[in-house]
Image (spheres, rainbow, N blue to C red):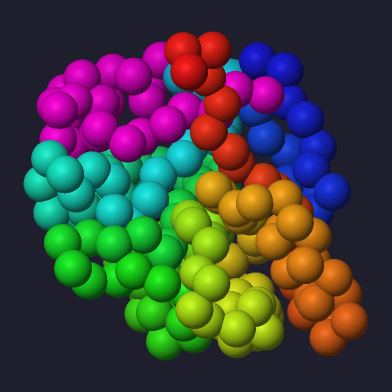
Amino acid sequence: MKKILLSNRLEISEVALGAMNFGTTTSKEESYKVLDAYVDMGGNFIDTSNNYAHWQGTGDESETLLGEWLRDRGGREKLVIATKVGFDRHGEGAGLKAAQIEYWIDESLRKLGTDYVDLYYAHTDDMNTPIEETLEAFDRLIKKGKVRALGSSNFDTWRLAEANMTAESKGLTPYTVMQQKFTYLN
């Protein structure tokens, strides 16, 4: 599978494997088959979230199943694991305040069974929290080695530009990846 190099030096497969339904509507056995096949084809970029798929369960299932698979299969260092923070899970966790970001990364790391994630997304914009507070919290995670790179998801482009200008002016880590909903079905 073809790999691309991101500006932060992460080398990722051109096609990411989304793990949204792993552990809920996709059984453990089927999830393992999909993960194994993806890696066998040369894929290395696996995408999850701290709230997948809370509408089918608690929101812990995807990260937990992925963590079990990583422990069972090994090879963590060959994979690029992305997870997210910011969306609600049954009335808890919504937002990008510093305390929320720091709490949820520790929960994600525990469920994934790893010391770091390669890419940590702000899953949705939080207009009620100052950009500086969010970026400072993410930057601390980078400096602590819990996160290697930052991404934004579901942001308006002007907000991403504003966030990265703020990061540059304050010497903070910028977002280097943007994940947007894109489908021919809409």
Residue at the far left in the pictured view: 57
Please give left or right for residue 183 compared with residue 93 in the image. right
* Image mark count: 0
The residue at the point 46 percent across, 13 percent down is 185
User: Does 147 appear above or below 99?
Assistant: above
Rendered image quadrant of residue 106: bottom left
Q: Which residues are magenta?
A: 14-37
The structure residue drawn at horizontal position 36% and vertical position 34%, both measured from the top left corner, is 19
- Apparent side of residue 139 relative to residue 65 in the rendered image (left or right): right
Given residues 167 and 76, the one toward you in this image is: 167
Does 78 appear above or below 141? Answer: above
Residue drawn at x 49%, y 85% as measured from the top left: 98
**Relative image position of residue 70 (x, y in whole percent):** 36, 43
Magenta stretch holds residue 161: no
Is residue 119 among what the camera can see?
no
Determine which quarter of the picture holds residue 146. Answer: bottom right
The question of residue 21 being in magenta is answered with yes
For the question of whether residue 69 can be seen, the reply is: yes
Q: Residue at x 29, y 54 (%)?
A: 51
Horizontally, residue 145 falls left or right of residue 20, namely right
Left or right side of 127 for 110: left
Q: Position of residue 47 (x, y in %)?
A: 46, 40
Q: Please tell me in which quadrant of the rendered image residue 31 appears.
A: top left
Pick whichever, 32 or 166, lies toward us: 166
**Along the line of sight, which residue is nearer the eye, 98 or 155?**
155
Question: Residue 25, percent across and down?
Answer: 15, 28
- For the N terminus, give its image quadrant: top right
The relative height of residue 7 versus residue 92 in the rendered view (above or below) is above
Farthest residue to the right: give it.
169
